[in-house]
Image (cartoon, helix red, strand yellow):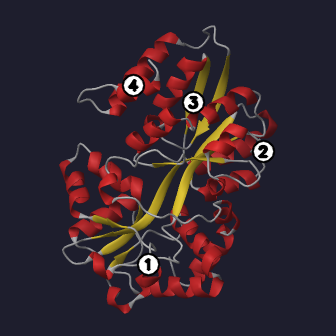
Amino acid sequence: MKLRNTLEMKGRKSIFNRLSLIALATSLLLPVGAHAKGEINIYSARKESLIKPVLDTFSEENDVVVNLITGSADALLSRLKAEGDASPADMFITVDAGRLHRAKAAGVLQPIQNDVLSANIPSHLRDSDGYWFGLSQRARVIFYNPKTVSSKDLSTYGDLVNPKWKGRICVRSSANIYNQSLVASMLEVEGREKTQAWIKGLVSNLARPPFGGDVDLLKAVAAGVCDLTLANTYYYGRLGQSDNAEERNVYNTVKLFWPNQADGERGAHVNVSGAGITAAATNIENATLLLEFLTNRASQEWYAHVNNEYPVVEGIGAPEMLAPFGTFRADTISLSQLGENNREAVEIMDIAGWK
């Protein structure tokens, strides 16, 4: 069954469950050794459940065997570097432009020029030299507890240094790539001096030292440990879809605020999950075909509804769990700069006391 038809099926089952059935059917149709046109080997830092169904659909539609290895982003990058030209991987899929840049800088990706990808993906959401391509977007924005914070009191990232937020903010560690990329984007827009001052002000307003992951922070806001935090939108959307009643309660308790939306402001900070073709790839044609497939309308709709991420292709609706919070204006700086500025971002976070 085509992915587009799957997305249009009626009924009460989730899109994820329907695509899982497709994945099972595909595994029966295309076992290893089947008479396929070829294969593609993928190293993916995305969890299998968040990528395999759409890969199985690609496999079925294009008669290409997809071999998938998943792992942590850092471990897979280290593996690619260690394997060098002998790597079997044709494609590397990971999250955050900062990590994609690290792969480019490590020499494990190769550039490609492709008219379909250039047409589908806005230029700021892909590498300027063609080494990697954004496949889905997430925004790192402000989440707050409406019992203690009025949305009227919120405005920009910069305002988080206001003394009114003293002892009221929770954040993740500075070791987190998402925070590093947020700071890297501020460096690009505000410069070093203003960004470093912002970090110092943010740290002075923390309710407690940095801790946990994004979901932990959202739970902390819901529990009253702090009044607001910075987190990625897709974590919040997943809480709304969770089978766990406590997690759904966090989604229903905490609210999302889009910062920097006024005229003249840069918009909300966005980042991507993305992919690139490896320098050692031997199945370049199939890898390119897969990149094109992942940016077609049906695949982009799947990413939105199953992964709670915003499409990179324009004209496709928001994830269901995030749609109630409306549209937003995103920062359009080139995400290549997030990687370029990463080292300086880490440096000033350390200097300013963001642990």
* Residue most extreme to the top: 35
Q: Mark 4 points at which residue?
A: 6
Q: Is residue 19 visible?
A: no
Query: How far is disc 1 from disc 4 in space, using C-alphas?
Result: 40 Å
Query: What kind of residue is marked 3?
Result: Leu
Give the mark nearer the N terminus: 2 vs 4.
Answer: 4
Q: Name the residue under label 3.
A: 68
Q: Residue 290 carries which label?
A: none
Query: How far is disc 2 from disc 1 in space, using C-alphas?
Result: 36 Å
User: Residue 52: percent from the left, percent from the top?
Assistant: 49, 31
> Of tags 2 and 4, which is closer to the observer?
4
Give the mark nearer the N terminus: 4 vs 3.
Answer: 4
Tag 2, which secondary structure? loop
Give the mark nearer the N terminus: 1 vs 4.
Answer: 4
Q: Name the residue under label 1.
A: 156
Reply above or below: 316 against 161.
above
Q: Mark 2 points at which residue?
A: 111
User: Horizontal placement of 352 versus 149: left or right?
Assistant: right
The residue closer to the viewer here, 161 or 292, is 292
Query: What kind of residue is marked 1?
Result: Thr
> Of tags 2 and 1, which is closer to the observer?
1
